[in-house]
Image (tube, rainbow, N blue to C red):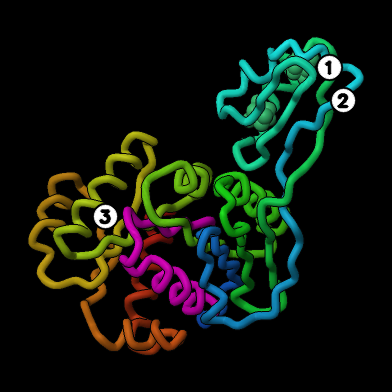
């Protein structure tokens, strides 16, 4: 079972939930892979401190074959990302703007563009422990977040059969990287915060998932009274898996890089049982 843990904004407790849930599943004997796909700021391994084996992740960039180039400018005109500048006798790529779409290579009639590659980040993995762990780590200043997530997911695909549960900790927000994470998982868990801002951001992720026609389950974190979120869930028939109370102790443990397991074993057990129930 592949489960994506997402949130409409940062700070809802998405990562706290993902790491504690993974740890709980391993504690009850499940073989688990936790994937930190929050590649701009992966921090899951701060809790596990596993030694990770890294490999680099690359994206396509075009390379000019100078002797073939007619400087016709077709490639620059077709580049949606303005990553190419061409004038007479001059061809220049701005690699940081290039999204690796290959449109330039496709439109060039003179076979003047060849394939090259650019490193966008790295992928770290530890399969010795349970939960096993994989993360993507984007280079500083790099913008191709979705490309790196795709690459980490390719790696997950190659090993996922070994695991009973794969938990994917997605980046916060509602943009392309989140869509990339949720598009082919079996279950989506949204972690939303019980606050006015939290509720607003939750409605954004609700709209996104509705647009994608993707069912999801909700964990309400920092639960106080659910004044706004509970009536909304009732109206939209949203399955609330758990309400985790607002407690200083959880934040304190998180800030020290500790798990908050013992106190919440029952919450995680309940979440898992409900997920399995829905699956059957
Ligand atoms: S389309 Fe091909 S030939 Fe024309 S400028 Fe680009 S690389 Fe050169
Ligand atoms: S690969 Fe795509 S984004 Fe990159 S330079 Fe070519 S057309 Fe532009």
Graded by Cα atoms within 10 Å as few (under 14), some (14 to 19) or many (20 or more), the crowding at tag 3 reads some
Estimate the x, y position of residue 213 in percent, counting from the top left.
37, 36
Q: Residue at x 33, y 87 (%)?
A: 252
Q: Residue at x 62, y 78 (%)?
A: 130
Q: Quadrant of the C terminus?
A: bottom left
Q: CA distance from mark 3 to mark 2?
A: 56 Å
Q: Is the CB–ligand 1 distance for label 1 below 8 Å? A: yes
Graded by Cα atoms within 10 Å as few (under 14), some (14 to 19) or many (20 or more), the crowding at tag 1 reads some
Q: Secondary structure at mark 1?
A: loop
Estimate the x, y position of residue 212 in percent, counting from the top left.
39, 36
Graded by Cα atoms within 10 Å as few (under 14), some (14 to 19) or many (20 or more), the crowding at tag 2 reads few
Relative depth, front residue between 203 and 113 = 113
Q: Which residues are magenta?
A: 1-26
Q: Is residue 165 visible?
A: no
CB atoms of marks 1 and 2 within 8 Å:
yes
Estimate the x, y position of residue 198 in percent, counting from the top left.
22, 59
Q: Secondary structure at mark 3?
A: strand
In the rendered image of this protein, does residue 68 appear above or below residue 180?
above
Picture quarter with ligand 2? top right
Q: Is the CB–ligand 1 distance for label 2 below 8 Å? A: yes
User: Residue at label 1?
Assistant: 69
Asked if the magenta segment contains residue 24, the reply would be: yes
Q: Which mark is residue 65?
A: 2
Q: Earlier in the sequence, mark 3 or mark 1?
A: 1
Q: Is residue 80 visible?
A: yes
In the rendered image of this protein, does residue 98 appear above or below residue 149?
above
């Amino acid at each position: 079972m592949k489960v994506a843990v997402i949130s409409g904004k940062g700070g809802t407790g998405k990562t706290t939930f993902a790491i504690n849930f993974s740890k709980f599943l391993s504690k009850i004997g499940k073989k688990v892979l936790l994937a930190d796909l929050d590649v701009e700021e992966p921090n899951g391994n701060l809790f596990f401190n596993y030694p990770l084996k890294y490999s680099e992740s690359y994206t396509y960039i075009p390379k000019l074959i100078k002797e073939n180039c007619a400087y016709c400018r077709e490639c620059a005109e077709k580049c949606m990302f303005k990553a190419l500048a061409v004038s007479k006798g001059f061809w220049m790529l701005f690699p940081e703007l290039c999204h690796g779409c290959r449109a330039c290579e496709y439109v060039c009639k003179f076979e003047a563009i060849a394939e090259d590659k650019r490193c966008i980040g790295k992928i770290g993995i530890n399969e010795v422990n349970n939960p096993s762990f994989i993360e993507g780590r984007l280079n500083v200043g790099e913008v191709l977040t979705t490309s790196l997530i795709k690459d980490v997911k390719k790696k997950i695909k190659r090993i996922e059969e070994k695991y009973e549960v794969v938990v994917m900790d997605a980046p916060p927000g509602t943009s392309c990287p989140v869509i990339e994470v949720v598009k082919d998982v079996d279950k989506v868990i949204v972690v939303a915060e019980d606050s006015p801002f939290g509720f607003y951001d939750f409605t954004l992720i609700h709209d996104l998932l509705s647009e994608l026609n993707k069912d999801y389950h909700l964990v309400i974190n920092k639960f106080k009274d659910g004044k706004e979120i509970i009536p909304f869930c009732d109206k939209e028939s949203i399955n609330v898996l758990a309400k985790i109370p607002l407690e200083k102790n959880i934040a304190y443990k998180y800030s020290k890089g500790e798990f908050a397991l013992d106190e919440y074993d029952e919450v995680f057990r309940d979440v898992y049982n409900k997920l399995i129930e829905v699956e059957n």
